[in-house]
Structures are given as C-alpha cells and as structure tokens.
Image: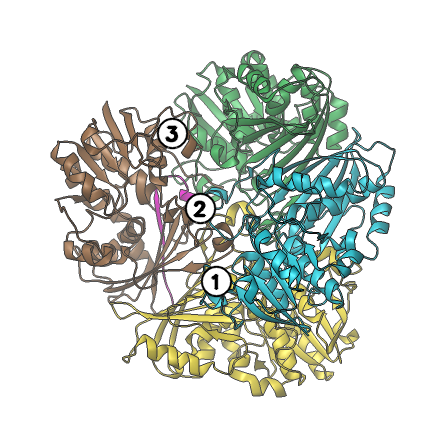
Chain colours: A brown, B green, C cyan, D yellow
Amino acid sequence: MINVAIVGASGYTGGELLRFLKYHPRVEVVAVTSRQYAGIPVRKVHPHLHEVDLTFENHSPADIDADLVFTATPHGTSMKIVPELVDRGLKVVDLSGDYRFDDISLYEKCYDLKHIHPMEAVYGLPEINRNKIKEADLVANPGCFPTGAILASLPLVKEAIAEKIIIDSKTGVSGAGIKPTDVTHFPNCSDNVIPYAVTTHRHMPEIQEKLRNYGKVNVSFTPHLVPVIRGILTTVHCFPIQEVTPQEMWEIYIETYQNEPFVDVLELGEIPRVSAVRGSNHCHIGCFEIDENGRLVLISAIDNLVKGASGQAVHNMNLMCGFTETMSLEGVGLHP
Amino acid sequence: MINVAIVGASGYTGGELLRFLKYHPRVEVVAVTSRQYAGIPVRKVHPHLHEVDLTFENHSPADIDADLVFTATPHGTSMKIVPELVDRGLKVVDLSGDYRFDDISLYEKCYDLKHIHPMEAVYGLPEINRNKIKEADLVANPGCFPTGAILASLPLVKEAIAEKIIIDSKTGVSGAGIKPTDVTHFPNCSDNVIPYAVTTHRHMPEIQEKLRNYGKVNVSFTPHLVPVIRGILTTVHCFPIQEVTPQEMWEIYIETYQNEPFVDVLELGEIPRVSAVRGSNHCHIGCFEIDENGRLVLISAIDNLVKGASGQAVHNMNLMCGFTETMSLEGVGLHP
Amino acid sequence: MINVAIVGASGYTGGELLRFLKYHPRVEVVAVTSRQYAGIPVRKVHPHLHEVDLTFENHSPADIDADLVFTATPHGTSMKIVPELVDRGLKVVDLSGDYRFDDISLYEKCYDLKHIHPMEAVYGLPEINRNKIKEADLVANPGCFPTGAILASLPLVKEAIAEKIIIDSKTGVSGAGIKPTDVTHFPNCSDNVIPYAVTTHRHMPEIQEKLRNYGKVNVSFTPHLVPVIRGILTTVHCFPIQEVTPQEMWEIYIETYQNEPFVDVLELGEIPRVSAVRGSNHCHIGCFEIDENGRLVLISAIDNLVKGASGQAVHNMNLMCGFTETMSLEGVGLHP
Amino acid sequence: MINVAIVGASGYTGGELLRFLKYHPRVEVVAVTSRQYAGIPVRKVHPHLHEVDLTFENHSPADIDADLVFTATPHGTSMKIVPELVDRGLKVVDLSGDYRFDDISLYEKCYDLKHIHPMEAVYGLPEINRNKIKEADLVANPGCFPTGAILASLPLVKEAIAEKIIIDSKTGVSGAGIKPTDVTHFPNCSDNVIPYAVTTHRHMPEIQEKLRNYGKVNVSFTPHLVPVIRGILTTVHCFPIQEVTPQEMWEIYIETYQNEPFVDVLELGEIPRVSAVRGSNHCHIGCFEIDENGRLVLISAIDNLVKGASGQAVHNMNLMCGFTETMSLEGVGLHP
C-alpha cells in the first residue's frame, strides 16, 4: 500500500486520476491539492466522484507527505514543484510538458519559456521505456497527441519505412482542459470542425524528438478540434521509401505490440474509432492500407484523458512501484 | 463461481452486460446468443469489447447450459424463452417488458400483444424488492424510465405528499436500441429535441402500477429524445397535498435511501445531471425545491443502459446469487 | 429606406440582427457598437458574416444617428441607454429585460436591480400587441422562453381552460449568450442534460404577468439545458378545468393563430421539434393530447435566437416602420 | 419565369433544393417526385418546409413537363432518367455521380456499375466551367468532397506547386443521405470520429480527374465521419516542389478567386471552420501555412448539402438559364 498525492487535482486529468485510483487495491490517495478550490469537497468540482470523500487542500510541495505524487499542473508550474518533491525522495509522475524533452532548448523554444530547473526524467511511454520507467524517480507523462501519434508511427521509423510522415489528428474538446474559452464554448465548437495551431503545435517537436531516437524522420502535424468530449483519432499519411504490402505492415505492428497490454492492433480491414476506447487505457491501431498512388495510412485511437494522460500516468505509477502494470486499468471502453 | 448466459447479446444491453461481467470475480460468461450474428466474434459488434473472446451462437433455450441467464430479448420474444429456462431450474433476469406487470391485461393493452405464458416474477428494482429478489427464480428488470421515475417519486407516494405527479423525462438515444431508425439518424436527432409518445408511452402504466403499491397516485408521463448517447434526466412536478418544506422533503429522501448503495441523494441546492452517472449504476436524486405557486420539483439522473438496464440486471443477479450486491458495479461515472 | 444602428452588436443576438438586416430591402445598417471590439471588423467576431463590411465602434448613445436602434445590451445596461435614444426621437427595440415588465417592482425583485429609468414600452410579442407595436417608440422584445411559452399557453388562459400550468422547457446553449462559462464549456454540457434555476428563473414572472392579462393563471416554470446550439422546446402540462377534447383544443389554436404569419399550428398528431424551425422566425405549436389521467399537453418549438430574440426584433421593426411585416424574415428552417 | 421539377425530392438534397427555390424570383417548382412518398405532402418528410404546399408524385420521366429538371437520384438511377429528359429538350442538373466523369471506364470501375447511357455533360463546378455551364443542356453537379477539395487544390496544380497532394477530409453525417444506417445511428457516430473508405473512396478519382486537366498531380484522399450535421472541412497537405512563401500562396489564391461570388479567400492567419458556412453556398479557403519540414497546408470549408450539392445545383441552374448567378443563394451562414 502506498500513499499518493495529486497536485492540481481540480482539472480533468485530476478527476481521471481519482477515478482510477479510487479502486486501486494498492493505493491510498492521501491528499489532493488545488489553490482555487481549497476547502471545497472534490465532488463539487467532479460531479461523478460523488462518493470520493476528499477535500481540496492548498498544500505547498514541502507539506506533501506521500510515496508518490502526480503533478497535474500546467507547464511552467511543474518545474517549480517537481524538483523539491524529487529531492525529498518522493517519486513523481509529472503530467505537464516540463520534463518531456531531452533537448531543453527545444522545450524553451516551443513553450516560449525559460526552464528554471531541468532534471533527468524518463519519458513515460511504457511501450518504449518500460524498463527505464521501473527505475525512475521522475517520469514525464507524454502529451496526448504524442501518445497516439508515436504508437501509430513508431514501426514506420524503426523499420525505415518512411522518412516524412504527415499526422492529421482530430481531438475531443476535453483536451483543452477544464477552463472555458471562446473555442470550447458549446455554440462555437458543437456541430463544427476547427483546425488550430496548424503548423505550430507544441506536440510536433515532442513527437519528432521521440521518434528520431529510432531513425531518420521528419514529422508534420496538424490538429483539429471536433465536437467530441474525449478521444483522439490520429491519421498518419506517408509514402513508404521501401516496398511494403498491407499484410507485411500489419505483421510488423502485430510483432511490435504483441506483448503490450494496452495496445491493440486491429485485424486487417478493421478501422479504429474513438468510441471503442472511450474511458479506457487502450490504444487501437489499424488500417495498413495503401492507395493507388502509393500512400500508406495508419490510424490510432485513444482516449486523450486516459491513455493520453491519467491512465498512462497510473500505468507509469504501477511500473515505478512494482505493481502489476494493468492494475485498476482493466476496464474496457464505454460504447456506445 | 457461476456460469452465465446472455440471450440476445448483440444489442446495447448485451454489450453492457458483457462490460460488467468481464471482471466480475464470481461469474463466467459461457454463452452469448444472437440469431443475426451467430458465428461472429463479439468484438465485431461491440467494438469496445476488443478483448472479450466470445463468439455469438444461435442457441435455442433448450441448449443453454448455465446457472443464470440474462434474456436481453425484445418484448414478445422473452415470453417464448423465459418459461422454459425457469422450468429447467435456471435463474433468469429478463430485461424485456414481458414480466414486469402484475396486471396482465394492462400489459396486453399497452404492449398490444397477447401474453402467451404469464409467470410469477419479481419486479427487479432492488430499492423496493431487495428481499424478494434474493429468493426469486425470475426477475423482471425494470424499464429505464420507470427506474428513474419511481426512485424520484416513491417517497412522494409513500408519504402521501402528492396524488397527481407529472413526469417529464429527457432520454439519450441509446434508449431506442441498437437498430437504426429515422428518428435515431444523426442528422435528425442531433441538435434537436423530439417529444414522442407524449401521452401514450408504455412505461407510464409500469410506473403507475408500481407506485400504486405504495399509495394513491395518478401518473402523467412524457418522454423527450435529446441528443445524448446515454442518460435519463427525469423531472417530477407536483403540487403537494400537505404542507412540506424543501428541508423536510430532503430529509424524507435521505432517510428513504440511506442504506442504498446505488441511490445518492444530493445535498440541498445540488441538481442532478446525467454526466455525473454516465456509465455507472448510480441514481442521483436532488432538487426538493418549491416555487411560489406551490409546485414541488424532484429530479433524478441515471444511465439508461446501466441503472436503467444492464447494471441493474447485474445488481439483481448479485442479489439472486448471494454475492456482495455491489460486486463489479463499483465504478464511478465517466465525466466529462 | 431607414438607417438602423445596433448597440451591443458583438453578441449572438447582434450577429442574428445583422444576418436578417443584410438583405432587408428597406434598411441600411449604419452603425454597430461594441465597447470590447471597437475597431475590429464584424466578421472577426461573427465568422459567418464574412461579407458584412462593418466595423464595431464605441459610440455613446448621444453619437448614434439613426432612425431606429436595436439595443442588444444586457439588462441593467439598456436602462442607461434607451431613455436618451427615445428622448432624442429615435425608435428603439430593446432586447434586454429592462422594459418588459408592467410591474416595475416585479422587475426589480426578479432581476435584483433598482430600475433607474422606467419608461412606457410595448411588450413586443406581435401576436398579442400588433397594433400597439405599430404605434410604439419603444418596444421591449420578449424573452426567449416567454415567447415559446406564451404562444403555447395563451389560448389556455384566454378560454379559461387551465388555471395552473407547468412549463418544462429545454433550451439550446446559445441562449446563455456568447460568453463562455463553466456550464457552457463543451465537455460539461455536451452529452448532458442540466436543469437550472428550477423554480427561480426570471422568465417565469414575465410569462405569468403577460398571461394574467388574459385570465387567471399560475405559472410554474423549469428550464433545462440540452446539447443543442439553437432552439427551445416547451412542454406545457396542465389539467383542464373544463371538459375539452383534443379536436376542440386544436380548433381553438387554429382559430387563435389563423392570421399569424409566424405561428404554425401543426395538424393533430404532429409534434413540434426544434430542427424544423432552426434559423427561422417561425413558432411551431402542436400536440393537443390528453392522457388517461386528464392531463393536457401542448408543445411549442422556436429558435431562441430568432423568434426568441432577433427575428422577433426585426418583426417588431417592420411593424414600427410600416414595412410588410414578414420582410426579410421569409426564410424557412435549416433541417437537417 | 421557368418551370422546374425535382426528381427524387424526398432526400436531403431535394429538401435543400426546395429551400432555395421557394423564394427564387424566377422559378416555379411544378413537380416533386418520389416513388416512396407519392401522395404525401412534402412537409411530412421535410418538417422545415411547413409552408411548402407541394405533394410528392410518382412521375415517370416522360410525364415531367418542365423547363429544367434537377435529378436528385442515386447513381445508377440517374442514367436511366436523364437521357430521356435531355432528348425531350429539357435542361437537366444531375446530382448523382453518373455524368461526372470524362473517362467512363473510370466511372464504371469506381462505381462498380456498367454505364448504360453515357452522354456529354459539363462538370458543374462554376469556378472552372462557368462558360460551358451557360451553354449546357446537361450539367453534372460535383460531389461534395470534390467541391471542397478541388477549390482548395486547384491553384496548387495550375501553378505546378505540388504534384502529390494528401487530402484529409472531415464530413458531417448528412453526407450519408437521409436513409438511416448503422454508422449514422446517433449512439454510434455521436461523440466519435470514424474514418471510412480510407484509400478507396469514389470521390478520389473524381477529384484527380478534374485536377489533372490543369497539371500533373497524384491525389490521395481519406474521409472521416465526425459528429456534425452539415459541413466538410478539407485539409490539404503537400510538399511544394518549388519555393513558395505563405504570402505568395495567398496572393495566388486571392487572384484565382477574386471574381468568384461564392469562394472567399480568408486573410492570412484566418482558418476556415464549417460553422461559418453552415447553410450557405460559400466556400471558405484559408491557412497557407508552411511548417519547418516544408509541408504546406490549405484548408477549405463548405456546407456539403449546399455548396457541396443543392446550392451549387441552383447556381448551375442560374447560369444555364441566364439568371443573375447568385439569385436566391445570397444568404449567409447560420452561426452559431
């Protein structure tokens, strides 16, 4: 049994962490912090957590007494909190972008921010870093788009099948966070499709840096907001530089992910859809089709708040703490 | 450990039964039947059940070998299957309307159908029939609207607070089942509100018959289709025939449901919303307000496929089989 | 040809006024004001008005030179602007609540605000006040809920059919205005039903005051937010105090509205739905059913931004200026 | 004044034709045909056309007496009707795929159908064929995806900027027609993103054939179903084969479309969204961004039922009949 704290628990990722940890047999949540909601019961902010008997507190990092801490704080804030926690010997899973980059200057450029406290961290995508995560004190939980994009593209890079990949993603609105904005206002984004940060999204450099550990690749990335609460559907387009067939592609993916508990390679002819993974920690990958002009298409689907955030964070915790890695993440998707 | 079969498992309630039973520690699902999809793997029909390794079969009732059977079949079909199963000594939870009515002539009138095989059955709303359900061989799982409506109205009738209640319900589209129709076609029901069966819905007599066991009451009921996948929000309007205050009303509800694991009476001032119970077996009840003209309002929220169907069916199974009654139904709602 | 100004043109009702006035053959829009967006082209705020070549200005009322002004300003603001405009001899259609009430103390109570400048105004529901509107200098455009509710209930009161009516309304999210809030954040209100101001909505006293001009009546009103962009579906429940049949009810409505260009009484058996009036100035009324317990149901559907706001305002302008009353409002709904 | 008939008027494109023709000052609709709904008033099928006083008839082509006919019939059906109408001297705008292809064998391959009656037809995209359309007896109205894709890509091909283009489209569900299917069932497609015909959609060869009239190009195309009623958002990705800047790209598009009444090239920095053109005949084009890896992105937005179908068909009629080309198509989009 370990004691866990969640810093910044009033957002959507905080709510999802609590949803998964509530029935985790090896975890007790001992503190949930929020400056804005200090003193307020959790269920007033997260109406689905009616039975969670916790109240937000306004703890400073120094006051947090736990074995492991999830920092569900914005980028720029995490870097002010995480180092002290790690120095005090606590394990940390950070859900912000602050510790995801190997190249700090790349981070500083795309987040337009000076990094005041870089530290060694493991990029928390278990499918590529499982063993390092097991030994880590600080895990940087991947971005939501990078999770779906890297899993769909990795074998293309590893096997030198493509050197230029175009990633066209469609994301649910919860990816924008719990704070209302003009774009997330229902009358604006319902019944609409809204491309944004078309060539400049921060997740592009994250995807590219991670994939370049496995081969030569240029990544082009464009996200679109669609009227969906949860889910990211990622369409990867590329022109292979070696001859491949759909069957061969499929076999490569099957082999790559055969032991992965949360990556499901669909059968040839099956196409991922976000509803199949709604609320679950699974990533569906499928398609493997090649058109008459030689373009190859791969598609992945994840829940941005689960495999793209809090579910993956719990997965990382399970690995860091030596628990069965699927513990409390077994649930299937909610469809319809 | 018991063996369970699901007859008619290709619909939404079948999919939900499988979602809950997959991790039930005391249940093994040994057969799932579907005439239409015989020979097809379950996950081709229920894309979220990617890891469920079952295939639909075209069993007749005589071939079903199990301890308990869920009949997720349409009304008119259940009456042809259930009696044989019960006679063979199997326990049955029937999700159709066929065994919900005490008054067969009322059933025959509102379903416009001759009942070819009436049997004794317990109406499976655990909050009113827990002990009878524990002893039952055949449980008639309540309709979705009646579940939300009865739980919200019961104390009004029991305490003789109102004799005429008006129930205005708003339902998600999954309540119409898995078969596409003109009304459920996305361009028709998205961005729309569609009242239907305004004074003639079959669930009205079901609600009224059950409530009249507890007092004198006339029930008026109107459902509306709203662009929501899951969920029923039920608004109960009435003019109390005795003087009550919101505080007194609230206390009555708190007392009525204090030991119920799946009925949550919200605090005064809190209003139920369907997202808080999405995917979960909980019913939220709240409001208790009285306006200047003396109208009292009660509101309940359920997930029509869970507390309104398959979750409640699993709850009934737990009671019938002597399991902990919340087993495998612990999950909280999926919000956002 | 008249010159028209719109004060507070950056909100949804401002956008709708511009949509209808763009092709109005007798109107030129000479000024659109907005403090927040002064200097910004209209199409930056209203992306559908790409071809409208106007820029928001920060005019004070004294600077507005026009024959008629629409004040699409919040309650509390209109009372500071309207009197000066009227005193200067301009005709005004005010879209706020400030001039809707005959009883100022009722206004002050339900808006929790001191009225600093009451004036004589005509309540701008053409179906009841057509002739007065033609002579008016100041028209108070009705609230969105009252428009749908009064049109559906008026004959019940006029003919003394019911003395207690319960109005259960379902509204699209654009009714909350253009400013994002927690409730209108897509992940919160999509796939959800959210009752609010269950017994305390400001539109209840407005409905009741107007109906009481025609007979004795108590109005109970509850609104629900549904995941719809535009539209209000109003369900009126009552127990008639005289004997009526659906056919008689229908005849009363047909007769009441026979000459109304924007009220369509559907045939017996037809039920209104909001998509049928999406974007149009029509109000559909239907149902007329009576259930076995004697409850009568009436249903109306409007577009809250059109018949419930800007379309009706243009209708009022047409009447005030002696134009054909349907001018530029002829368009049918957008379905699907 | 001309007499117009609509064959196959019970679908969504039929409803939209009626919406636009109702107030067309030079057109009288004299017949609307539907085998399925013969004898039924139009407004029973198209609830928004409450005031359209027409009834579906079951006419054979020989019985149609009109100056111009819209054939809103499925592919395979149009080829059986259109030739007789043209031979009798009627002008025809065909909304199916039957007459869109120059290369009949390509048509037969991708529609998997023998063409029993090829005829000369003009491809009805006014932006490329305005003069030919004016002289045509038979106009083949473009597909919905091709309309948005060709308008967004044409300058890339004409100016030899790209030879391989990847088109990733997101379409509203009304594109699937009025007939309900599993995919269009609300609980399936709401809150979901569903890629389909990923490398095999029939509109790809249509797009490619038309663009190849202007230069060398390979087109790769993938559509995705998103939970939107109307609208297509098309994202065009390419790697330019000559050096271009965003500013230069923008100028090329501005120049190409400067005289087009229905193509709006947005300013640099503005991004199209489907809500801005909802219900209108406009196509918005924007983006012109180039990422650090040299990928250029263009984006277009149309309403699939208007510019992608019936609005464009009315535009073609206006050209064929010598009317002002924007007649009855002036309306702006419905936003929000």
Query: In which quadrant of the rendered view does residue B226 lie?
Result: top right
Determine the residue positioned at 50% across, 17% down.
B260
- Where residue A308 appears, as percent x and y from the top left, is 32, 45
- What segment carries the magenta color? A274-292
- Where residue D65 appears, as percent x and y from the top left, is 78, 77
Structural distance between the alpha carbons of marks 3 and 2 = 25 Å
- Where residue D314 appears, as percent x and y from the top left, is 64, 75
Task: Indicate left or right for C133 with C185 as reference.
Answer: right
Examine the rendering and report whether any part of residue B198 can be seen.
no
Amino acid at the residue labelled 2: Ile
Q: According to the image, label 3 marks what residue?
A: A40
User: Up-down: is C263 above or below D279?
Assistant: above
Q: According to the image, label 1 marks what residue?
A: C45
- Where residue B43 appears, as percent x and y from the top left, is 44, 41
Q: Pick whichever, B13 or B332, lies toward us.
A: B332
User: Up-down: is A104 above or below D26?
Assistant: above
Q: Pick whichever, B321 or D107, lies toward us.
A: B321
Q: According to the image, label 2 marks what residue?
A: A229
Q: Quarter holding the N terminus of chain A?
A: top left
**Pointer 3 or 2: first along the chain:** 3
Q: Residues within 10 Å of mark 1 (few under 14, many from 20)?
A: some
